[in-house]
Amino acid sequence: MKKILPVAAICSIFFIGCGGAQEPAAEAPAEGGAANELVSGYDLANGQEIYDTNCAGCHAEGVLNAPKTGEVEAWTARIEQGMETLIQKSIDGYTAEGNMPARGGNDALTDEEVANSVAYMVKESM
Ligand code: HEC
């Protein structure tokens, strides 16, 4: 299930070249410098691919109490934990209000792929 990248996502991957121009908020929340800074070390294109095939099943619609991607209120406090914590919890899995399976339930994913998909979700949810 490959989707064509929306303009905002392409912009976010090459954000340096976008010069802070405001994209119309089609589905992603307004982009801020803080989000770019947080996810700057990650491969967001790979992250989106991993997300689409492994994470969207729960995180697109909030299945099993999963925080919905793009729903800023659901993510603000989570993002405050910091990228490293978010990534580690995604690798190990954890249970609080719901059940986040280790590596989204796909043991074949590398730590790096999980990290990229977390970065993609964070980027879309700030
Ligand atoms: C089977 C459903 C399911 C799948 C698939 C899934 N998640 Fe989750 N995820 C959850 C649920 C439920 C929570 C909330 C758990 C809670 O807070 O109790 C969650 C929470 C999270 C959080 C927030 C962590 C925090 O500290 O608040 C991150 C980040 C995350 N998932 C990343 C991912 C990534 C990356 C993938 C794909 C590789 C993925 N998830 C796939 C169900 C899922």
Image (cartoon, rainbow, N blue to C red):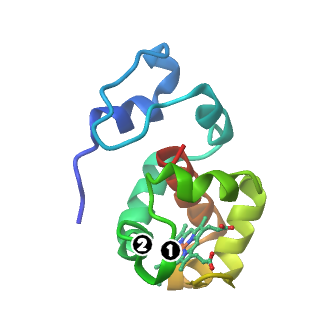
- Residue 99 appears in the rendering: yes
Beta carbon of the mark 1 residue lies under 8 A of ligand 1: yes
For image coordinates 43% across by 69% down, the residue present is: 59
Q: Closer to the camera, 46 or 92?
A: 92
Residue 88 position, x and y percent, is: 74, 69
Q: Position of residue 34 (x, y in %)?
A: 65, 32
Q: Are marks 2 and 1 in contact (CB under 8 Å)?
A: yes
Characterize the local packing of mark 2: few (<14), some (14-19) or many (20 or more) Cα atoms within 10 angstroms: some
Q: Which residue is mark 2?
A: 62
- Which residue lies at the image location 27% right of the left edge and 37% below the top edge? 26
Q: Nearer the viewer, residue 2 or 83?
A: 83
On the image, which quarter does residue 85 sit in? bottom right
**Quarter of the image containing the N terminus?**
bottom left
Q: In the picture provided, is 81 more to the left or to the right than 15?
A: right
Residue type pointed to by label 2: Gly
Q: Residues within 10 Å of mark 1 (few under 14, many from 20)?
A: some
Q: Nearer the viewer, residue 37 or 109?
A: 37
The single residue placed furthest to the front in the displayed view is 73
Give coordinates of residue 94: x percent, y percent.
69, 83
Gap between marks 2 and 1, in whole Å? 5 Å
Q: Quadrant of residue 40?
A: top right
Whether residue 76 is situated above or below residue 7 in the rendered picture: below
In the figure, 48 relative to 40: above or below?
A: below
Tell me, for residue 22, which label it has, or none.
none
Q: Is residue 59 left or right of residue 90?
A: left
Where disc 2 sits, the SS reads loop
Quarter of the image for residue 115 reads bottom right
Instruction: Report x, y in % for residue 52.
Output: 36, 64
Q: Residue at x 51, y 49 (%)?
A: 72
User: Which label is found at residue 66?
Assistant: 1
The quadrant of the rendering that contains the C terminus is top right
Q: Amino acid at mark 1?
A: Ala
